Amino acid sequence: MIRRLAPAFAALAVAAASLSAAAPATAELLWSQSFDSRALAGPMRFSIYLPPGYHAPDQAERRYPVLYLLHGVGDDERAWPQFGRVEQTLDGLIAARELPSFIVVMPNGLKSWWVDSADIGGPGDYATAVRDDLPAHVEATWRAMTVRDGRFVAGLSMGGFGALRLGFENPERYRAIGALSAALWNRVQAGWKPADPARMTRIFTGAFGEPFDPQRFLANHPRRYLPRVQDPAEPIGIYLQAGDDDGFGTQFSTLELFQELRDREIPAELRIDDGGHDWKVWRRALGPMLQWFAAQVRPD
């Protein structure tokens, strides 16, 4: 066929065929990207997973649902891909047709607890950065869906706290929320004083004031925003998981939250798995959570 074309057209056809062959069919994991966040008044780092075929010419108009996946205390934007095996899990599920192609964005939130804290000298306004600045950058740079039905937020431990808070506070922005071993600290009440203030400083690093202010914590707790998901304008999925041997007791606080959701007639999915508060549990939990999210995805 090409032999019958004029030389110039033949060259273009060969070049197009070459580009098509060169387009990676495999997934792409971009480590430690950065953009300037207005909320943080500086750079925010993140890693991003682009699904297989993202660069294929026949997918050039396609937009993908996005999962914002939050890390726990002491981790950063490299934790989920390095220890959570995000790339391997998504590659396997997508290849088996058990999951539509997702973009996954894994930001660095320091020890911010994914709340705003610049006004008290804390790590910074990370809730606003993740809610507004990061999606704006991702949706302008990659072919991410720009509607609510294409946005998901999830996380582990501190990231589970952050995902629940972001989702409960802003149900108009997310289709579903996932919380793995969410560090809810249900024992904190008004006037609560920690037995080990130095430990609280290491864990919270001023995100709720220094010294730790229980009133500030309760004002930012996901439970405070439950009325917003009690009768949302659009359905919102809630997925809760914890290990039954979690040394921090997140299985009990997760059960308490699940019961409160049921009492308020808010639908939620619950998984209590074997294991503790560690990557073995979270790696195992990632796939089932993603498969549950798959049922929530609607076409752009």
Image: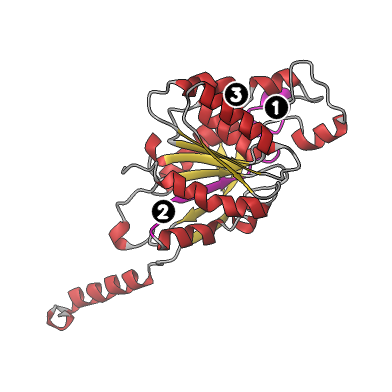
Q: Is residue 41 visible?
A: no
Percent coordinates x, y for residue 195 in the rendering: 87, 28
| Residue 223: assigned label | 3
Q: Quadrant of residue 60?
A: bottom left
Residue range of the region highlighted in magenta in the rendering? 97-124
Q: Is residue 264 visible?
A: yes
Mark 2 and mark 1: Cα distance apart in space: 34 Å
Where disc 2 sits, the SS reads loop
Indicate whether residue 115 is drawn in magenta. Answer: yes
Bin the neighbour count of mark 2 within 10 Å (Cα to Cα): few under 14, some 14-19, many 20 and up.
Answer: many
Q: Is residue 202 left or right of residue 61?
A: right
Which residue, given by chain and number where applicable, does mark 1 sit on?
A: 186
Taking depth in this image into account, of 75 and 254 the one nearest to the observer is 254
Mark 2 and mark 3: Cα distance apart in space: 30 Å
Percent coordinates x, y for residue 218 in the rendering: 68, 21
The structure residue drawn at horizontal position 71% and vertical position 42%, both measured from the top left corner, is 73
Q: Number of callouts in the render?
A: 3
Amino acid type, callout 2: Leu
| Residue 99: assigned label | 2
Mark 3 and mark 1: Cα distance apart in space: 10 Å
Q: Is residue 274 above or below residue 18?
A: above
Amino acid type, callout 3: Arg
Amino acid type, callout 1: Asn
